[in-house]
Amino acid sequence: MLDRFLDSIQFQGQALVLRADRQKVLAGNIANADTPGFKSRDFNFARELQQATERGAADPSRLAPVAAQAGHVALAGSAAPGTDPKLQYRSPEQASIDGNTVELDRERANFADNSVRYEATLRFINGGVRTMLSAIRGE
Amino acid sequence: MSLSKIFEISSTAIAAQSQRLNVVASNLANADSVAGPDGKAYKARQVVFQARQPERVDGTAGVRVSGIIEDDTPGKRAFDPKHPQADAEGYVTSSNVNVVEEMVNMISASRSYQNNVEVLNTTQQLLIKTLQLGQ
């Protein structure tokens, strides 16, 4: 029962880390909107999250608690594996003559979208924690 | 902590844009200045931006001003023999600042500055909410 909650929180935690990574990449793009020759970067969020989840499940170095006594509850591991998303280059719709491929309107839209999704993930985690706490308290 | 790196990235961009604004202000202030006794008038200056390209996702992609270049186009020359700074032929050389270009530069710099401030504000809100996680 408890490990399901923990699994869900761990998954959301991974999503949160990736969202923060993407936020950073987008902030870098916006910061370099006027830099000649700068190439806009981004990564495929869905694929990276899937890979991070698979890596986490298959990682043998993951610290999994062992039920050594009869009364212990079996739990999934809680060590979150590091994320290292593969950055790709964005293909511009209207490239500028100085070789810069940052399109501010798109970057701003992506940035706003990513912020909202980051907040949504935060709320999922908060909801999970609150559910667990109310189950523990028995209120 | 990935989000706190954004403060670093955006602040480098804000610093670079404010330096660009400074240079524009200097150019505009000297748009009408004439050549001194040495015959050299003020030359328009431009900043050169350079990215700190990320090697990995946690390498920051900030901006830095790699240098300030001087515009070498000749300054405007006007015939005014009564002017105290006129040369032997009666011409006065003034700066080579193109006021229209500088105004466009100023608008572009201030918009980019605003954009980065906006990014900082959003990031700050997200970080505060992250700190309140689980409460």
Image: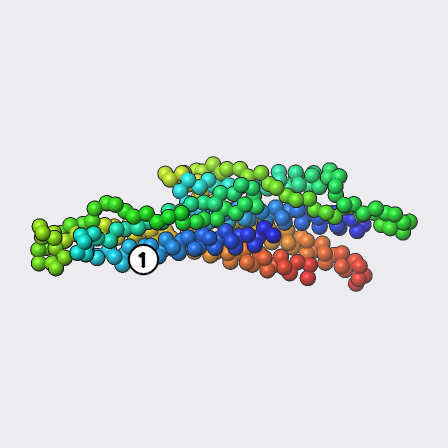
x, y percent for residue B123:
54, 55
In the image, residue B109 above or below residue A97: below
Subunit that carries the residue with mark 1: B
- Label 1 SS: helix
For the image shown, how many numbered marks are present on the structure? Answer: 1
Judge by depth and name the residue closer to the eye, A37 or B55.
B55
Q: Residue at x 73, y 39 (%)?
A: A59
Please identify the residue farthest to the front as the structure is shown: B38
- Judge left or right: residue A48 versus residue A31: right
x, y percent for residue B84:
12, 59
Q: Is residue A107 visible?
A: no
Q: Residue at x 21, y 53 (%)?
A: B41
In the image, residue B18 above or below residue B55: below
Q: Is residue A52 visible?
A: yes
Q: Residue at x 36, y 55 (%)?
A: B21
x, y percent for residue A4:
77, 48
x, y percent for residue B73:
23, 45
Q: Residues within 10 Å of mark 1 (few under 14, many from 20)?
A: some
- Judge left or right: residue B67 versus residue A30: left
- Judge left or right: residue A72 versus residue B93: right
| Colour option used | rainbow
For the residue marked with disc 1, what is the amino acid?
Ala
Quadrant that contains the C terminus of chain B: bottom right
The residue that label 1 is drawn on is: B25
Judge by depth and name the residue closer to the eye, A58 or B88.
B88
Please identify the residue farthest to the right as the structure is shown: A70
Judge by depth and name the residue closer to the eye, B76 or A123.
B76
